[in-house]
Amino acid sequence: MSTPLHQKRIYEEITHRLQSLVETGDLKPGDRLPPERQLASLFGVSRNSVREAIKSLEQKGVLESRPGAGTFITAGSEADLTRQFGEIFAQERHRLGDIFELRLLLEPQIAHLAAQRISARTLKELHGIMEAYDLALREGRPVYEIDQSFHDAIAVATENSSIVRLMEEMHDMLSESRDEALQSPARSRTSLEAHMKILEALRRRDPQGARAAMTEHLEHARNIVFTSKNGE
């Protein structure tokens, strides 16, 4: 089975960066792994993706977690270390692409239905969420949970308990794409602006506009994640 082109490019890019670390002596067997934040910045992925990759590599015996000391590299050779790191991160990025694909199938249609049924109370709640989002950005605070609340409120606006339950059960999985898309203040500000467009369509009770705005938002977030580097 051939490797999808976008996955191959990700694999090659991450492998190249890892190889540079190996060649400079910054990453070699026996060393303690750099902090999650540093690895996330280096590879342009979220800390959650880093954690998942580390967990997988521990299971493969490439890494060893030592309580109180950190995570150490146990691979037998630099080449093996680079190859396995690259493969794992490429798999994580491919999985993230699947999550965005799922969101694009579900959330635009949820917004379409919400625009037909949204109550004045939910509209007021969404306005409050956006005010909290803007304040958090101005104060330099994380917006992940606020972002989640916005999408949850849209699900509630459908007045369909099955949709609400489905979105709640998918929180952990969907949060991975959200973490990636909100890595920097610039990304978060762009997301806020996209949310305001969605909210305006909901306020007008415009199903087509709400669906289009949600689609645009998710496609833009996906493009940012897969074309940007270092969280920019």
Image (cartoon, rainbow, N blue to C red):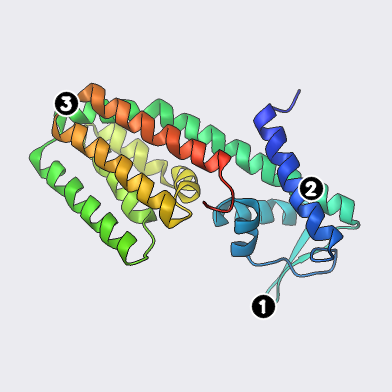
Q: The residue tagged with tag 1: helix, strand or loop?
A: loop
User: In this rendering, would 14 be left or right of 119?
Assistant: right
Which residue does the numbered mark 3 point to in the structure image? 116
202 or 188, which is in the foreground?
188
Determine the residue located farthest toward the right in the rendered image.
77
Q: Quadrant of residue 118?
A: top left
| Camera-nearest label, 3 or 1 | 3
Whole-percent x, y for residue 55 in the image: 67, 55
Q: Which mark, residue 230?
A: none
Q: CA distance from mark 2 to mark 1?
A: 25 Å
Question: Could you classify mark 1 by the number of other residues whose Cα lies within 10 Å: few (under 14), some (14-19), or many (20 or more)?
Answer: few
Q: What's under tag 1, amino acid-wise?
A: Gly
User: In this rendering, would 197 be left or right of 18?
Assistant: left
User: In this rendering, would 158 be left or right of 121?
Assistant: right
Q: What's under tag 2, amino acid-wise?
A: Gln
Question: Could you classify mark 3 by the number of other residues whose Cα lies within 10 Å: few (under 14), some (14-19), or many (20 or more)?
Answer: some
140 or 88, which is in the foreground?
140
Whole-percent x, y for residue 51 in the image: 61, 56
- First-in-chain label (3 vs 1): 1
Residue at 63 percent of width and 43 percent of height: 92
| Camera-nearest label, 2 or 1 | 2
Which residue does the numbered mark 1 point to in the structure image? 68
Q: What's under tag 3, amino acid-wise?
A: Gln
Residue at 77 percent of width and 47 percent of height: 15
Residue at 73 percent of width and 28 percent of height: 3
